[in-house]
Image (cartoon, rainbow, N blue to C red):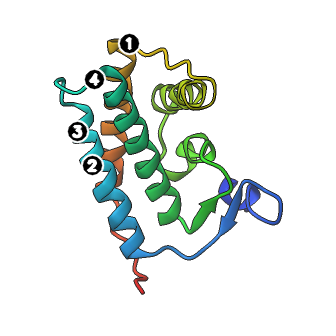
Amino acid sequence: MVSPLENLSGPGKSLQKEPPDAKEFTGLMRSGVARLSDAANTSNSLEGRFDLAYNAAHALCLAALRWHGYRPANRYVVFQVLPHTLGMGPEVWRILAKCHEIRNLGEYVGDLNVDEQLVAGLIAACRAVVAKLDTLKPPGRAP
């Protein structure tokens, strides 16, 4: 049986196969956890906290995808495949997908409309991703 990640991989598809790399995985985890910690700091601006939490989410979800031996063709796919990389349910990936849309509006249209509840939900989703990632052993290949 072909895995859902395998179905999404190949020329012109959302994922490309690439062997996992322990150093990359560790770096993505370190970056994600550091940004998540900074995002929880309420002395930072709300917009800054959103940006930090969103980038933490991306790094952490990318670490999960890379652990499985795939690289994404675009940013969004790392959130879409969370059910297959970490077994995450819609309560996590939906908030991350919504935040991706909000991030794009901020980046490309200048309309970053965030509030405390959204940022708190994003931080909680990131923490759930970290908890799942912490159960994985780092991949074996390192340069």
Residue 135 in view, yes or no:
no
Residue that numbered label 1 is attached to:
115
Q: Residue at x 57, y 49 (%)?
A: 84
Work out whether residue 102 or residue 14 is closer to the camera in this orientation and state it. Answer: 102
Kind of residue indicated by mark 2: Val
Mark 3 burial class by Cα count in 10 Å: few <14, some 14-19, many 20+: some
Helix, strand or loop at label 1? It is loop
How far from the left and from the top, in percent, is residue 121? Answer: 36, 22
Mark 1 burial class by Cα count in 10 Å: few <14, some 14-19, many 20+: few
- Residue 33 has which mark? 2
Kind of residue indicated by mark 1: Asp
The answer for how far apart the CA atoms under marks 1 and 3 are is 17 Å
The answer for how far apart the CA atoms under marks 4 and 3 are is 11 Å
Query: Could you tell which of marks 4 and 3 lies nearer the N-terminus?
Result: 3
- Residue 45 has which mark? 4
Relative horizontal placement of residue 10, taking residue 93 as reference (left or right): right
Q: Residue at x 36, y 74 (%)?
A: 23
Q: Residue at x 36, y 35 (%)?
A: 53
Kind of residue indicated by mark 4: Ser
Marks 2,1: beta carbons within 8 A:
no
Query: Could you tell which of marks 2 and 4 lies nearer the N-terminus?
Result: 2
The answer for how far apart the CA atoms under marks 4 and 1 are is 11 Å
Helix, strand or loop at label 4? It is loop
Kind of residue indicated by mark 3: Asp
Helix, strand or loop at label 3? It is helix
Query: Could you tell which of marks 4 and 1 lies nearer the N-terminus?
Result: 4
Q: From what the image shows, is residue 62 above or below residue 43?
A: below
Helix, strand or loop at label 2? It is helix
- Residue 138 has which mark? none
Residue 21 position by quadrant: bottom left
The answer for how far apart the CA atoms under marks 2 and 3 are is 9 Å
Residue that numbered label 3 is attached to:
38
